[in-house]
Amino acid sequence: MSLTTSPEAPARAPAPRRPRKTNGSAAMTAARTRSPLAWAITIAALVVADLMTLAAVTSFFSEGTWYLAAAITVTVAGINVVALVPRLMPMRWLAPGIALLLLLTIAPQAYSFYIAFTNYSSDHLLTKSQAIDALESVTYLPEGAATYDWRAYGDGGEDTLLVVRSAEDAAAAPMVAEEGEPLRPLDAGGAAGDGFPAEVDGMAQLDTAATAAALDGLAGTEFGPEDAPITIQSMGLAGEYADRYAYEDGVLTDQLNGREYRPVEGTFTTADGQFEVSPSFQTTVGWDNFTEVFSNPKIRGPLLEIFLWTVVFAVVVVVGQLVIGMIIALALNSRDVPRRLAKFVRSLLLLPYVVPMYLTVLVFASMMNPNLGILTELGENLFGLDRNWFGDPTMSRIALVCVTFWLGFPYFLLIVSGALQAIPDDLLEAAEVEGAGWWARFRLVVFPLLMRMISPLIVLGMVANFNNFVVTFLLNKGGPPMTDTDTPAGSTDLLISYTYKLAFVFGNGSDYAQAAVITMLIFVVLIPVVASQFRRYAVWAEEN
């Protein structure tokens, strides 16, 4: 009998232990478990913040700044949610940054978009309720109503009365006027030489300084009987004035002449359109501002020229700054230049970037002054250039580009110098072994790697120069002015400086709504550029 033994089965290796899936659960659980004291402190802090927010929001709504009230409400509500929901604990570290982003960036941009659909301008500053209040405060003197000279009397407290005397009849006896009380005669024996006594009912006459200080309160008070109250108009005049305008059921009535006004695009206007009253108020006008910008040739033409110049300026400036910065960086990175000398020269060339841009631009503006500027003198003596650089559109643009070159090339010198340090020497040595000259090494190795590393910074530089307000406005205020335009457009204006002029520099014709339209255009142009960089970052993350 034979026994056969089967080969021994190989022992099974123990299955590898799966790592415990924690996802930080233990730490998160411990962090989410708050002590009663921590909860009490959190709730107390939120209550205080919410009460302060409620007071601020109520004030903002009463003043008509609903957009700010809405932004603060949304922000504080989000903070409450993040603070009270345990699952959102990691968001507490991001909450301050997100809150500031919402309040300082998103909310103003959203409000600018809203303004683009309104008639908001220097002629339409008030809200409707504010405009109605202002009109209802206007008074007039009805026919046959009396006017008076007056003096104010007080006892140092809140009680005040007037002594009035007819402005038409200097010999008339003075009368005492109190709030809500009939006029009563003044004892003539108490009157001084000017007809007004030094004291009435234990109240002393206010001197000129005290009267001027109390004038606002006195002007808002009606003295005398309720059916014919006396109101103060100025330091020397009071009278039985009446409210000129009355607003009811959407109709503003002029009590003086009986005209009726209804709101038409933010202005109270008569039915036949012949008469209007001020102030006007803000209201939505739909797409009217966009239609005006793109249909009016005196607006559309300058705007298109400014837009094209803005794009050309941003591209030319960034390319020029990059080329200058790259040439200097490559030269200083050469093996033939001593390291100490390279460091010294590089530090020296960074000074234009370190000195505040505001001061540098003002210095250049002084050097290009048509009368005393040193660059003006050199340009005229050496090249026969016109002294008035800023009077010619082409020369002004060249000057603007040159100044911006000077201000920005150190930035690209800095980033290119840093990027060159990241290029492996092995690649350059291998290319040199293969017989590649310096141009071939630069074109095939250095330049592609540089562009890969600094291309996002180049795009951001274009965005920054697209909105380069400081240089444009301080150097020449966007001048010289364009002709045949209804707006304050200048030949060297960028979109950002043109927007500023529309909103704040155009005198009584400041048009905030049109400025908001251009702000929207800037947003529409720049958002795709920024979005493309986000996509590029995502590609880099996948490659790494």
Image (tube, grey):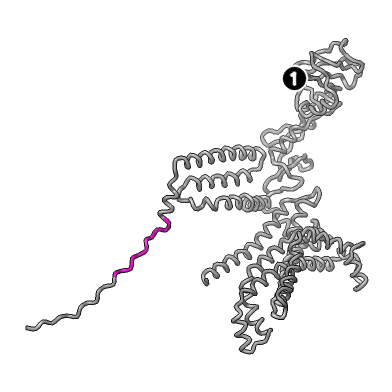
Residue at 56% over, 38% down? 48
Pick the residue in front: 470 or 426.
Answer: 426
- 123 shown above or below 464: above
Q: Which residue lies furthest to the left in this view?
A: 1
Percent across and percent down for residue 223 are 77, 21
Pick the residue in front: 519 or 95.
Answer: 95
Q: Does the magenta stretch include residue 19?
A: yes
Residue at 62% over, 81% down? 445
Q: In which quarter of the image is residue 12?
A: bottom left
Per the image, the residue denoted by label 1 is: 159
**In the displayed structure, does residue 50 sit left or right of residue 494?**
left
Percent across and percent down for residue 219 are 78, 27
Pick the residue in front: 397 or 322.
Answer: 322
Q: Magenta residues?
A: 14-24
Q: Residue furthest bottom?
A: 435
- 456 shown above or below 91: below
**In the displayed structure, does residue 22 sit left or right of residue 515?**
left
Residue 484 visible? The answer is no
Quarter of the image for the N terminus: give it: bottom left
Classify 10 Å Cα crowding around label 1: few (below 14), some (14-19), many (20 and above).
Answer: few
Q: Which residue type does callout 1 highlight?
A: Asp
Pick the residue in front: 93 or 10.
Answer: 10
- 371 shown above or below 177: below
Principal SS element in the magenta part? loop
Residue 98 visible? The answer is yes
Residue at 69% over, 56% down? 519
